[in-house]
Image: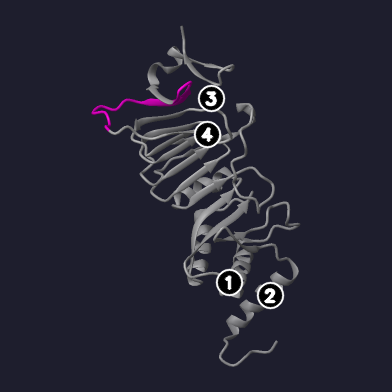
Amino acid sequence: MIIEPGVSMDETIEDASASHLVGFCSQVQIKIEDNRVLLILPTAEEMPLELPWSEIWQEIKYLVKQREQSWPANAAVCLVVGDRLIDNRQLQSVEEVLTEAKLRLSAIRTSRRQTAVAAATAGYSVEQNLLPNPLSLFDVPPPSTEPVEMLAEPLYLKNTVRSGLEVRHPGTIIILGDVNPGGTVIAAGDVFVWGRLRGMAHAGARGNQMSQIMALQMEFTQLRIANSVARPPQKLPHNFVPEIAFMSKTGINLARASDFMKTHSFLLSEDCWVKKN
């Protein structure tokens, strides 16, 4: 090993270790797509032997350093982790590496519910899907007749969805907290907010018009169910009650949550909710 002048022994060993990883078992990828950087970690299936996080972190650090001239300063980064279980400490270590390279970790794409919860709790946007290809984005497919039981397990979040945070999930999303203005929740199933819904919520993102949006307090900036969109009323009520947003023949309507199932039923022939006779 030749040590160049001005380079410490520790730095040389670190670079050599990273070079060894990149040369023999590299699976971490960097890709620029849609004006942001995708930092893609290997899935569990792609690694014959599970690498310790310290080695994956070293490889991330090496690759980011090698490519640091390939993107504009403060570019947004989406960390694609697939089925890996990533905790808050590991997310913080990745963020530190990216910050040194003048990059900004903004989103986590995962198929693990625990990782999605950790990312949302740490304040990152979450793109959760069940697709096997780690390079694929969470795209909302065309309207489908896929039954509800084929959706993913519900995603439970016990925190507030703050402004700038986006949570996506191919099933129902249940939030024990508020959705602040500027926060976005997109679900293939239902959206339940045990708090104030003051941001944007999209239920039935795959085209299911049976999906509903419920909140203890509806102060939304926008509601979407399947392909329909609703704006908030010009005047908000003085007294809020838990309400459900649902698809009717005329579009998205609101009703009291307490008696909705007693007064409405879903009519398959009309593909919407109607009042019972």
Mark 1 residue element: loop
User: What is the quadrant of the N terminus in the image?
Assistant: bottom right
Of label 2 and label 3, which has the lower sequence position? 2
Give how far apart the Cα atoms at labels 4 and 1 are: 37 Å
Horizontal side of 142 relative to 183 (left or right) equals right
Residue occupied by mark 1: 70
Q: Residue at x 73, y 66 (%)?
A: 25
Looking at the picture, how far across and down is residue 18, in whole percent? 65, 73
Give how far apart the Cα atoms at labels 2 and 4 are: 49 Å
From what the image shows, is residue 166 above or below residue 18? above
Circle 2/circle 3 CB separation < 8 Å: no
Q: Tag 1: Cα neighbours inside 10 Å, few (<14), some, or many (≥20)?
A: few
Q: Tag 3: Cα neighbours inside 10 Å, few (<14), some, or many (≥20)?
A: many
Mark whose residue sits in front, 2 or 1: 1
Residue nearest the observer in this picture, 223 or 12: 223
Give how far apart the Cα atoms at labels 3 and 4 are: 12 Å
| Residue kind at label 1, given as amino acid type | Ser
Residue occupied by mark 3: 210
| Residue kind at label 4, given as amino acid type | Asn
Residue occupied by mark 4: 227
| Residue kind at label 2, given as amino acid type | Ser
Of label 4 and label 1, which has the lower sequence position? 1
What residue span does the magenta drawing correspond to? 235-251
Mark whose residue sits in front, 2 or 4: 4
Give how far apart the Cα atoms at labels 1 and 3 are: 45 Å
Mark 3 residue element: loop
Q: Tag 2: Cα neighbours inside 10 Å, few (<14), some, or many (≥20)?
A: some
| Residue kind at label 3, given as amino acid type | Met
Q: Quadrant of residue 130?
A: top right
Give how far apart the Cα atoms at labels 2 and 3 are: 53 Å
Furthest-top residue in view?
277
